[in-house]
Amino acid sequence: MHIVIIGNGISGITTARWIRKLSDHQITVISDETDYFFSRTALMYIYMGHMRFQDTQPYENWFWEKNRINLLRDRVESIDIPNKKLNMRDTSSIQYDKLVLALGSKPNKFGWPGQDLDGVQGMYSAQDLEGMEKYSEGLKHAVIVGGGLIGIEMAEMFHSRHIPVTFLVREKSYWNMVLAPDESAMVNRVINKNGIDLRLSTELKEILPDENGKCRAVITNKGDEIPCQFVGLTAGVHPNIAFIKETEIETQKGIVVDEHLETSVKDIYAVGDCAQLRNPPPGRRPIEAVWYVGRMMGETAAYNICGKPVEYQPGIWFNSAKFFDIEYQVYGTVLANPPAEHKSLYWEHPDGEKSIRIVWDDVSGWVIGFQTMGVRYRDEVCRQWIRDKAHIENVLMNLGLANFDPEFYDQYESEVIALYNQKTGANLQLMEKRGLNSVVKFIKKQFA
Amino acid sequence: MAQAHNSLSLSNPHPTGMDTVQKIASAIGGLGLLILFISLFGQINGNYGTWLTASLALMTVGVCVYAWREYMDKPEGIKNNHVWHRTLTNKGLWGWIVGVVLTGFYVVLYFYPQYLGLAKEGANSGLIALFDSLSQALKGQPASQWFVYGALYTLAILIFGVKFLLKYRHNRYQQIRTLSVMFFQLGFAFLIPEILMRLNYPYNNFMNMWPLNYYFFDGWNIQAMTTSGKVGMFMFAWGILMILVISPVLTYFYGKRWYCSWVCGCGGLAETAGDPFRHLSDKSLKAWKIERWMIHGVLVFAIVMTLMVLIFNNGTLRSWYGFAIGSVFSGVIGVGFYPLMGSRVWCRFGCPMAAILGLQQRFFSRFRITTNGGQCISCGNCSTYCEMGIDVRSYAQKGQNIVRASCVGCGICAAVCPRGVLRLENSAIDINSRTDEMKVIMISENGVRI
Ligand SMILES: Cc1cc2nc3c(=O)[nH]c(=O)nc-3n(C[C@H](O)[C@H](O)[C@H](O)COP(=O)(O)OP(=O)(O)OC[C@H]3O[C@@H](n4cnc5c(N)ncnc54)[C@H](O)[C@@H]3O)c2cc1C
Ligand code: SF4
Ligand code: SF4
């Protein structure tokens, strides 16, 4: 059987690796972006000089041949579904028995005047990185549009090269659709502290060209004109499915898939950023454009393709990011605008750069989410508590189990408890401090 | 909310490259180095003490002021911007220059000390004479090339240690660890042995054990210790105790890091002066294969050599070992190649001590680096900055613990990870299963697990 995978990102590659683990099928992975799989999440570190491009490739180049994963650098122009054939840009067409669509995303553009000018781009692909590198030469001012995770990464990138940045954020506060006001305010502070010109509640209206068709300034919805030679469009991404739309494969925002990640057409699967779950599990969104989802979907799809049907079960949500020097982690449900029954305890360090938030259900007392800034929490423990519906007071007393900061770091769990006691009149004491011994015991107990 | 647009140049107030103060600091440090160079060519005669003090002070001030400017006016955090852009740290022009100069220094030091001014008879001259006064003050003898080397080595660990402390001021593990290597170098590797010699006891670094200290079982060394009264006997007993009891026990509890990145002088230099070059270590599987052959080969060599000395009283192998491993490998290549092959070439490919501790760490130690469930984004920072060339990411992205013989527990992988994935930990409870966790695998034959 010949399995063809379009896309060599995390989802496509994970699919390929697992198919190889599970079977001897012939595997071909096609991408028009790069010869080898690299970590998109590390694009910023290449620009900032932390790593070279090859350092972002998780596998050495010999890996693919050794594992008999055939790599092809080309673009798929269209799919001939009745004949199970892919029409390619450069090479002759390719026959498949099963097809995996791992097409990823594309940066959003909202029809702004001037959005296709020279010097205006998003940051998604290796080519985008080359573009940034090219435009950075002699760049005096950059404007970034869109206050999400990629926008702040782009700001940090230019910052590292001492290129002044204006950061236009439509919302009242950075990423406040996801972060609660306290955490969002913390990130605002960090952005300002680093000398980024953060403009909240500000939208892009228009990008102005110079005589050569290159951007020379942006105009905001407040009427300000900001001269710049580069505009970064980072207002989110959408599934990269233009050529799928022309086929009979069902699409909405993304490629619609069932629990087995199969599309409406038999033997065609979709994974990663481009896939949209017809019936997302409770608490999960239909499209989740994050690394981990691509990885989990890839594994699930491989099982299904190899005749071992399993449903996609992503489990409890988790994610992480880094805002300049502040690390962010979340486990479970922590909403920016929570319903009344979500109670939340928010502790913040006096330095204003560390915080711990715990969310629980007011009626049952079950813990449903953790969110930390500048403090590392332990995935296994947090998600175990959420899965087990642990009671908030029980969790607090054992909170040290969740601490994942390096040795010798201050532990703030007793301060979190003190805050809880003060707010509720309870009299809880911290019983577990940070440390692997108790964690192992805790986890063993859960599985016993 | 019209803001004045000319305030936009606000971004990143820290200049690219060096600022004026840093340029002055570099000049000051360079002046200190220049004094050493001038003395090397016999141009300093007399007033040795003053010149030496001036030189050491200038270098100290230069490095400390430079580092202060580099880090203290920036927010705390990881400082790897432009590491791969600068020719000193990307195997470019400056890297080669420093590599060649360092290598040249080691060749002269080991094989042609007369060019440093070492006199077989009579008074030293040149660079070595410059250190005579310090040597006299400490051990009551004129300096040797080894004294000069020891003093400069210690200075490097101290001043670049200060730089590292400032760079990692947000990370208490790095702080304590660095203070520890600075302490052990200054006290145990430098001052105590010299003072012992002043008191007519044999030279002894209590923290340097066989087989790193490959002459421990040499006849002359055993004799020196056993004929130096209680103190000598203590040295002998302590040396044996270190090998047989202290080091295995500590490695069992904490992994080999207690030695390699907290105590050892070779590690100390790698972690301080060598820190800017840590990313240059080769991460390929091939390098790992070569590493395993080489380091265990050296270990076997060291053991055979010692047995030859002990049982057959045959020193031929021993002198070969001293030349090939003790001099060429540990010094010339080990340090000289910092800017080309990273800071731990010796520790990774050549140190027999690292080999022994590594085997202990791999097979019976509570130590491991744990990965935080599925949080890894495969970015590669951990692997890039692992000075031992461990492909940390290959474990982290599978959710597997890192249990590797070569890991020196420096903790830098955990520090640079932008997603908080890695943690250095010890536990006895799951000691036998610490390597086989694969948490990110979602599905298994027995159903779904996350
Ligand atoms: C800068 C940046 C930082 C990020 N940081 C994080 C993070 O910290 N954490 C996190 O969870 N997520 C992060 N993400 C999101 C994460 O990277 C994506 O969710 C993930 O890479 C998607 O993987 P994928 O395999 O679905 O698609 P992709 O990685 O996009 O792979 C799709 C590939 O398919 C190729 N392709 C598409 N169509 C065709 C065709 N017709 N022919 C040939 N090839 C084709 C594309 O060129 C591309 O190479 C980040 C994304 C970016 C851009
Ligand atoms: S794995 Fe981490 S702790 Fe071990 S040597 Fe490498 S960087 Fe240091
Ligand atoms: S640095 Fe962290 S996120 Fe990046 S590959 Fe290593 S463990 Fe994964």
Image (spheres, coloured by chain):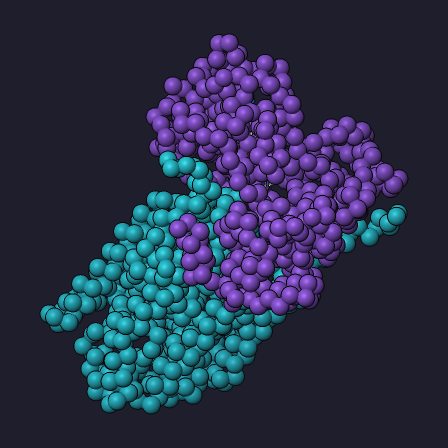
Residue at the top extreme, as displayed: A82
Q: How many labels does the image show?
A: 0
Say if residue B22 shows up in the picture: no
x%, y% of residue B246?
Answer: 31, 73
Up the image or down, A55 lies above or below B360; here it is: above
Q: Based on the displayed image, in which of its 4 quarters is residue B252 positioned?
A: bottom left
What tint does the image give chain B? Answer: cyan
x%, y% of residue B164?
Answer: 53, 65
Chain letter for the part of the structure drawn in purple: A
| Left or right position of A23 against A312 | left
Q: What residue is shown at x 51% (from left), y 59% (from top)?
A: A401
Q: Which is nearer the eye, B409 or B437?
A: B437
Up the image or down, B187 lies above or below A401; here it is: below
Q: Which is nearer the eye, B161 or B54?
A: B161
Q: What residue is shown at x 38% (from left), y 19% (from top)?
A: A1
| Left or right position of B387 against A125 | left
x%, y% of residue A201?
Answer: 81, 44
Q: In which quarter of the image is ligand 1?
A: top right
Q: What residue is shown at x 43% (from left), y 24% (from top)?
A: A305
Up the image or down, A49 lies above or below A419; here it is: above
| Left or right position of B312 against A301 | left
Q: Based on the displayed image, in which of its 4 quarters is residue A19 positioned?
A: top left
Q: What residue is shown at x 21% (from left), y 87% (from top)?
A: B227
Q: Which is nearer the eye, B407 or B320?
A: B407
